[in-house]
Amino acid sequence: MRLSPRGRVLPGFGLGLGISLLYLSLLVLLPLAACVLKAAELSGSEFAAAVWNPRAVAAYQLTFAASLQAALINVPLGLIVAWTLVRYEFPGKRLLDALVDVPFALPTAVAGLVYGSLYVKTGWLGQFLCPLGFEGAFSRTGIVLVLVFTGFPFVVRTVQPVLEDMDAELEQAASTLGASKWQTFRRVLLPMLVPPTLTGFTLAFARAIGEYGSVIFVSSNIRGQTEIAPVLIVSRLEEFAYKEAAAVAVLLLGVSFLLLGVVNLLERWTQPGSAPRFVRWPLAKVGHGLEAASAWLAGQGGVKWLRTLLTPVGGFVLRNLQQLMVGATSLVLGVLVAIPLANVFAQAFSKGPWKYIEFLVTDPDTRHAMFLTAIVAPLAVALNTVFGVAAAYTVARFRFPGRTLLTTLIDLPFSVSPVVAGLVLVLVFGGQSPVGSWLKEHGFQVIFAPPGLVLATAFVTFPFVARELLPVLEATGPDEELAARSLGANGWQMFCRVTLPNIKWGLLYGVILCNARAMGEFGAIYVVSGRISGQTDTMPLRVEKLFQEYNQPAAFAVASVLTLLALVTLGAKAALERKVHAERGAGTHSEGM
Amino acid sequence: MSITVSNVTKKFGKFTALDRVSVEVPEGALLALLGPSGSGKTTLLRVIAGLEQPDAGTVRHSDADVTQQAVKDRNFGFVFQHYALFKHMTVFENVAFGLRVRHWPNKQVTERVHELLQLVRLENMGERYPAQLSGGQRQRIALARALAPRPEVLLLDEPFGALDARVRTELRQWLRRLHNEVPVTTIFVTHDQEEAFEVADRVVVMNGGRIEQDGTPDDVFEHPANEFVMDFLGQVNVFHGRVHDGVAHVGGLEFDVPGSRVSGETKVFVRPHELDLQRYQNGVPSMAAVVRHVTPAGSVTRVLVCVADTGMELTVELSPDRSAELKLKKGDAVFVALRKVRVFEPDYTI
């Protein structure tokens, strides 16, 4: 079946594409363009001065170095965890699997708060580590640690499906051909794991570069020393240096898009033989080099001592591989995820349950923050749901020029720093811009007011619904919809009676994920809200403010509510995952397309 | 190299996949393991390869007991049903894999791989990836890969199962020729009796984790050991009759079944080509019937008839000559003669 641009059989192309484009333009393209235009108001030398001064360079160095370190650490950790979760059966496996998603669902402000307090001298882990010289808070190490936390699921979740899809017969084939366990791993499994690992690494790296919420808690944010690039943008903005802030943002955006492009290419190259020669050739050379080196080593009598040394160690590792891997996975997830989670609740209840309730109920500003989060998040989710359904349906059911571009644009907010997202909205709707001042004259304030919060939240979370629906719709195929049309259903009847019931679990799943991120959103809201207590503070912002006021137990009390929401989200996600799986599985009959 | 399987038992949970199975495969044989799905034939093949550990029994290779030997040390080539080609490697590297892990020098690897690609007639495909090949080509690459390290035994699991009918027929003949060129001891699994008869020198029929019959294709087809083999190998007409003192009574007709120890009610089996049709009852004992359908299927004409007395439907296969002579059409009255009948002794071993 070919759905050509002319003579489309299924209805709703114009409406779907219209909604998608309008929403994308208003929320993303227009603000991004405004940011570029703002930066363009600077002359060449001014631009250079804005993006390339000692303070900025120091910020870039810290951002990129810390992000790179964190992403590099995530590769072995992610591989170990993914391998263990796919290959072994052991008690508690499902719990560990659920813990992997915590960094996706936990608000970054909560992560920053708890990581900041775990590694100080009096913290749960700091009390042991600080005497050993490991300064995990208010230091560079602290920044790397929290970035490892936020980026770690990317590697696990990109490697895991590839490992799951690997046919056991491939390894059996290798062994019938005479390959040892090590040779099988090195020649068959490892090459297949390289593309997803690279993708996961790039995603973790991109995420780390844009990360704001968690870092400002664990970093002392000292100018030129522990100040990351997004913090630089915020402080420029607070100095009302809009053009300079935009200039730095444009630079970060450039890097984000570059990384997004790399991820897309990597995904395409995952198909064997599709990588261009200039990529394959050096990789093959490196492989051959390793091969030659190991053959040479094997041939050298001189390294015999090395072998006698390594053989017992290697033998021990191979014999106890499962226990070692499960142990390592438990350790990684325990230290990175479980201990911080437990610490949030421990600190929240440190003054007793009555005090805990008091923190949440008596403070009017905290109450207002909860109220505001409960309003803003659902509104943003509702907007994104309409967009997500329209965009996913359009992309899955129609072929049209620019389709690939639309798919890429859906992913855009994943790679834009939340701070940049906030900034671009300020540049369009803020009091200093023509649009913003016109709106204000007509009595409608966007920035430093709830509408801005909704927009910022929607920007950052808008891929979630569309991303979840796309694979479900693609797996279901258009056959049932075509059948409904042939039986005389009109567009709405077809959509409500066939399309929607088919994707309902996937839709709910996307909505839940989107909502979790919306409630926890920090960086973008931080920029657009103006942080007026009792007026524009949402819960994550309230956490930060209480933290700044040295009211740790209260900050943790609010954080514990957010954590609980994240855990509920993960529980619901686990339950829905099975249903979505069934939905996709049911769609496999549509191969005839 | 010969393979001797003795008393092998393999259970998966409560399911017994192999029940005290013994087979001997002499050197250079081309043997088919034939049976319906779930009969244990693939499990037996995997036990021989070492991909499954038997719960009891032994696998011997020449004179050595290899039951406990690691898969990688056996040097038995194995071709998987879905080929299990390494997707990230070119065709060349797939075939070279077994040589590379044995640290062959580059030059010899190249020579050997080219030799094999020539053998499977895919010389120009070396730089392609498995995803760029057709099903039949993948199948041949899988075979080349298994043959590259000069295996002592070649094992194939449903080698033609995933291919369409035409490619299948071609590859069968090709495998037969290949075995003549490279006479390595070969065991292959199939559920298709035609395939087994066409390719193999010897056929082992399996059912329910046991061996029902072991013999040449001719043996197995002409002298099936029991009801299962009779029923499994091609179409068969089943009559309900009686046997008494070496005489079978079927639909008012009598046949000698010499040497049969059966007595009383029994099933009587007649293959479609062992029936004949006549226009007139010319002295030969026969049953009156009506033609229901005529299928001219090429080498044989298949006629479906309905026996007048009992309403039973029979399938009859006629040679083209005979069919041209009779000029049958739907509704014609005919007489069915039985050239040969078989009765089997009930299986008391259960």
Image (cartoon, coloured by chain):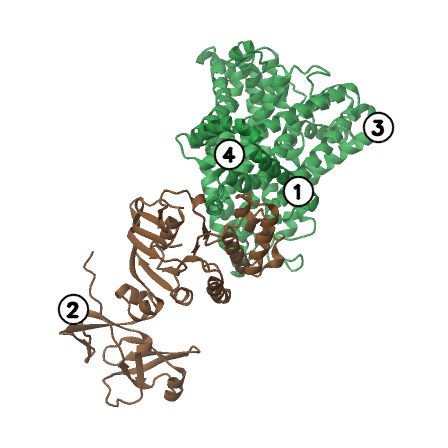
Alpha-carbon span between mark 4 and mark 1: 23 Å
Which chain does the residue under circle 2 lie in? B
Residue appearing at x 64%, y 53% in the figure: A399
Same subunit, tags 2 and 1: no
User: Residue A82: which disc?
Assistant: 4
- Residue flagged by tag 1: what amino acid is it? Leu
Q: Is residue A525 visible?
A: no
Describe the element under mark 3 as helix, strand or loop. loop
- Which shade is chain A? green
Describe the element under mark 1 as helix, strand or loop. helix
- Which shade is chain B? brown
Please give left or right for residue A39 compared with residue A395 in the image.
right
Q: Is residue A487 above or below residue B283?
A: above
Closer to the camera: disc 2 or disc 4?
2
Give the residue pinned by disc 1. Answer: A265
Q: Quadrant of the C terminus of chain B?
A: bottom left
Closer to the camera: disc 1 or disc 3?
1
Alpha-carbon span between mark 2 and mark 3: 107 Å
Alpha-carbon span between mark 2 and mark 4: 65 Å
Which chain does the residue under circle 1 lie in? A
Alpha-carbon span between mark 3 and mark 4: 47 Å
User: Residue A42: which disc?
Assistant: 3
Describe the element under mark 2 as helix, strand or loop. loop
**Callout 3 environment at 10 Å: few (<14), some (14 to 19), or many (20+)?**
some
Please give left or right for residue A499 compared with residue B263 in the image.
right
Please give left or right for residue A3 compared with residue B320 in the image.
right
Which chain does the residue under circle 3 lie in? A
Number of disc labels: 4
Describe the element under mark 4 as helix, strand or loop. helix
- Residue flagged by tag 2: what amino acid is it? Arg
Closer to the camera: disc 2 or disc 1?
2
Give the residue pinned by disc 2. Answer: B261
